[in-house]
Image (cartoon, grey):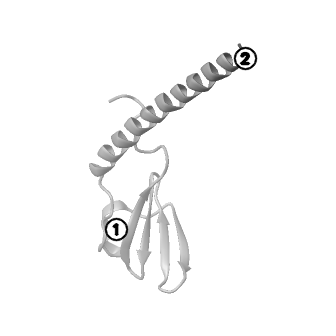
Amino acid sequence: MTRKVLALMIVAAAMLCTTTGLSADVLLIEEVRQAENMPLPVNGMDKEQVRNRFGAPAATHAPVGDPPITRWDYENWSVYFEYDLVLSTVLKKGHVIDKNGD
């Protein structure tokens, strides 16, 4: 009897993990769709273009490494520069999905 109960508990736990995983996948896909429509700096823009279009960053970080990589932090995202050009823009966790349901 104990083996049957243990087996049922394992199956139930596996089903719970699978359901939770599917929910996370759907949320991730929705975040990607929303991120594609957000106005963000794109690769190749220079620092002056980013500042003119998006305003002054909330924080800036000194260059690190060779080539020098600089980070500017905005409210919902950070932009990384190699020398003077945008290398990548990274969204902060939890700032993509509209929590109001609009």
Q: CA distance from mark 2 to mark 1?
A: 64 Å
Q: Is residue 29 left or right of residue 63?
A: left
* Mark 2, other Cα within 10 Å: few <14 / some 14–19 / many ≥20: few
**Residue on which the image places disc 2:** 2
Q: Which tag is nearer the camera, tag 2 or tag 1?
A: 2
Q: Is residue 28 above or below residue 64?
A: above
* Mark 1, other Cα within 10 Å: few <14 / some 14–19 / many ≥20: some
Residue at 30% across, 65% down? 42
> Furthest residue to the left?
37
Earlier in the chain: of badge 2 and badge 1, it is 2
User: Which quarter of the figure is the N terminus placed in?
Assistant: top right
Relative image position of residue 82 (x, y in whole percent): 42, 79
* Disc 2 element: helix
Residue at 61% across, 26% down? 10
**Residue on which the image places disc 1:** 50
Relative image position of residue 100 (x, y in whole percent): 40, 29
